Image: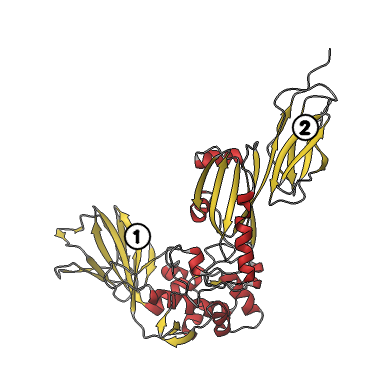
Amino acid sequence: MGRRRSAAGAAVIAAAFAWLAFPAGALGSALIVINGRGWGNGIGMSQWGAEGYAQHGWGFERILAHYYPHTTIGSAPERPVRVLLAQGETEVTVGSAQPFLLVDSRGRTIHVRARSLRLTPRLRLGGHALVPPVAVEPGAQPLTLDGAGYRGSLLLERTAGSLAVVNTLPLERYLRGVVPSEMPWHWSAAAYEAQAVAARSYALASLHPAAPFDLYADNRSQAYGGIRSERPETNLAVGATAGKVLTYDDRVIAAYYDSGSGGRTAAIQDVFSGHSPEPYLVSVSDPFDRLSPYHRWRVVLSSAVLSRRFDVPVADVRVQLNPSGRASRVRLLAGRATRTLGAAAFSSALALRSTYFTVGVASLIGPASHTLPGRRLTLRGFLRGLAGVVLQKRSPSGAWMQVRHVVTRSDGRFVTTVRPRATTAYRLAVDQIAGPTVEVEVAVAR
């Protein structure tokens, strides 16, 4: 994520708008092939890429310098962070293996023996009505929330008739529950250390003293699993990098990171609309992301499925790319009608792994009426973004056989002729993926 622009970037932009020259005539039922890369928004460090660099002998400092150029590694003092664990709850269970305390907003303190307490938004304990927010303070053992252990204290807040729970704990203890939640087990120490520094930086850049909490416990901020997530090898990485953060211009940066970039990270302004460029969140090469099982992925749909998903009669899909090579806008076309979506909305609706995708289309239009045996019949269609497409025919046994490779004109359209001798069907196929069928009725000669 950054603002790297060059002649190559200009070529990408020109190619992204080239589809505007294509006619948007009526198309038949189409095969939609979405070819994508990576998992996540692609900003900052690629976790799979970091592991690849670590396997090639890079230390965490060098890994971080690659993904966050122009930054330096500085030090930050220990401080607490507040993590939202739950909200909108009608009941929560808090407890500990040793005695603990409940302290309400009026200073009422209740000593609780080792056990679990079920609390509702009424916040009553025996004959005591607690006034929120209620702090749950640990004793000699950590606290639990609904059976899961957390270091530090818990704060119960009542909002709109339900409960929210915030975990307050030292930053370094928080990171022990983040690093193993964000990276797989059995990775390299340098990758874990790079993750620890990035996560520490992101957390410190996300503090909001005037807000009820600083961070979510999921991918809205960083995945945080509490004590159950902690592992010896990741604890070592947190300890080895204690206090180390990424800084630019003497301030700690929001060190974005994600699972995989698909081979190249993205500039922040290309992903987050309206965001100013940052010199340390630029597009950089990420060759070792190929280790990721989601380095490349594919989703295949029919235009009929898209029509139902977006409640518009989709005949074609066209994508506009940004300078980082990711989709920025998606146009759904049906004849002269067009619906435009942001790439993030399109990706979310289809549960795609990223906005680093292109869309290929293979559309086949059949005859308007039946034909006679052996008579020449014209099939028309349109291809874009797909190579090696073949026309297939259904045999009398039901098996599909190849008729020919499809050759298009410069605008992507094609016309081909067939001479069916009996009622059959035709379809387009690419890489063993078949599109919708076009039925051809052949009348019996009399």
The disc at residue 363 is none
Q: Earlier in the sequence, mark 2 or mark 1?
A: 1
Q: State which mark lies toward you, 2 or 1.
A: 2
Left or right: 68, with 103 as reference point:
right
Q: Residue at x 83, y 15 (%)?
A: 445
| Residue, disc 2 | 378
Across and down, in percent, residue 225 comes to 43, 67
The correct choice, above or below, for 390 with respect to 365 in the image is below
Residue 252 horizontal/vertical position (percent)? 41, 80
In this view, 79 is above or below 391: below
Residue drawn at 63 percent across, 44 percent down:
23
| Residue found 52% across the figure and 78% down from its top | 68
Instruction: Depth check: give the residue in front, 238 or 22.
Output: 22
What is the three-letter code of the residue carrying label 2? Answer: Thr
Q: Amino acid at mark 1?
A: Ala
Relative horizontal placement of residue 435, taking residue 256 as reference (left or right): right
Disc 2 and disc 1 in contact, CB within 8 angstroms: no
Residue 427: image location, x then y, percent: 73, 37
Q: Can the viewer see residue 230?
A: no
Q: How many marks?
A: 2
Secondary structure under the numbered disc 1 in the rendered image: strand
Q: Quadrant of residue 247?
A: bottom left
Q: How many residues crowd around disc 1 within 10 Å: few (fewer than 14), some, or many (20 or more)?
A: some
Nearer to us in this view, 5 or 372: 5
Residues under labels 2 and 1: Cα distance?
61 Å
The answer to whether residue 11 of the structure is visible from this angle is yes
Q: Residue furthest front?
A: 21
Front in this rendered view, residue 251 or 135: 251
- Residue indicated by mark 1: 86
* Direction top: furthest residue: 446
